[in-house]
Amino acid sequence: MISARFMASSHWRKSQTRFHLPLSNASNLMKPFSSTPTDSAALSSSPIVELRHYQLHPSQCSLYMEHTTQSAELRKSLPLAFFGFPEMGSIPLNTAVHLYHYPGGHSERLERRTVLARNNEWKEYLGDVKSCMIKQKSEIFVEARQVIDYHAIKGLQYWIDMDNNVTRCCNESSNKGIVELRKYQLKLGYDTVPKFLEIYSEALPSKLRAAGHPTTELVTLLVSDVGSLNTVYELWKHGGEYCGFQAMEQSRQASRGAQEWRKGIAQIAELADTFDTTILRATSFSPLR
C-alpha cells in the first residue's frame, strides 16, 4: 500500500508543474512558470536543499567548532550554503544548523557525499567531532519556484557562487548580521501547500515593497520533500555592519503596514498548525552570513 506521506509529497511535486499565479497579480513582479511535464528522469535531477541539525553537548561546542572551522573547505565541496548556531528561538541552543544546495538533486548529493566520505582528512575530522554530538537530523527541501522566480530573490545558489568567487577580506567581528528562520507547519492535506504558495506569492510583493531596513532580504522559501511533510521555511537575512536585530525589527514594523501582506498572513494562519522562528548567527566560513 502506498503511504499517505509519499502521496502527499508526490502530489505537491506535481502541483508545481501546473500551478500558476492569478492574472490579477502584477506581471512585472512574477515570471511565468514552466508548463513542461515533469518525467521521472527530470524529477531525479531537480535541485534539492538539505537541512541538517546537529545537537551538541554544551561543554563540547568549542571543540566541535575548532575542528569544524579547520575542515570548512572540505564541507564546502558538498556544497555548503549556510552554517550557523541559534541565538534564540525554537531550535535548541548549541545546535549546528547547516544548509546544502544540490542543483543536480539526489544523485548529486549521493555522489558528492560518497566522494567526501572517502577523503582521509574528512574521516579524521569525523573522528574528532563524533563525541561532541548528541543527535543528528537531516531533511530534504525544495526551493519554491514561486519565490525564486521573483526578481528580488537570489536563492541559496547565489551565496555559494559569491563565496566561490569573492575572497573574504573583511573583519568578521564587524559582521552584526543575523539569519531568521521562520517555520510554518501546515495542516495535513494534499492541497495545503499549493494553497499556501498561492497566497504567499500574491502577498509577498507588498511586504518587499514596504519601507523596511535596506539590509533585510528574503533569501529563499523552502518546502519539505523528505522528512516532516507540509513544512515551509522562510529564510531572511538582516543587517551586516548594521545591527541585525534592529534591521529585523524595523522591517517587521514596516511589513505590518503592508495591507496585502496582512491579508495573506490571515489566510495562511487558517492553513497552519504552528508557526515559530529562530534567530541564527552564521559562522565565519558560512557562505550566507
Image: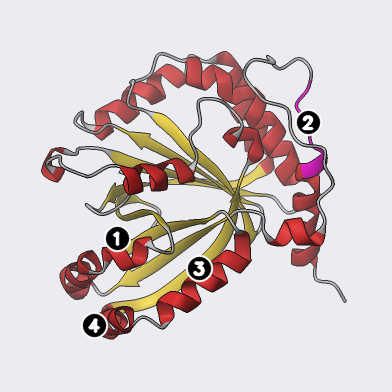
The residue type indicated by label 1 comes to Leu
Asked if disc 3 and disc 1 are in contact, CB closer than 8 Å, the reply is no
The residues tagged by marks 4 and 3 sit, at their Cα atoms, a distance apart of 21 Å
Q: Is residue 174 left or right of residue 254?
A: left
Residue placed under numbered mark 1 in the picture = 93
Question: Of helix, strand and loop, which one carries label 4?
Answer: helix
Q: Earlier in the sequence, mark 1 or mark 2?
A: 2
245 to the left or right of 92: left
Q: Which mark is residue 128?
A: 4
Classed neighbour count for the residue bearing mark 3: other residues with Cα under 10 Å, few (<14), some (14–19), many (≥20): few
Q: Which residues are magenta?
A: 17-22
Residue 122 picture location, percent across and down: 32, 78
The residue identified by callout 3 is: 138
Amino acid type of the residue tagged 4 in the rendering: Asp
Determine the CA span between mark 2 and mark 3.
31 Å
Q: Which mark is residue 20?
A: 2
Looking at the rendered structure, the secondary structure element under dot 1 is: loop
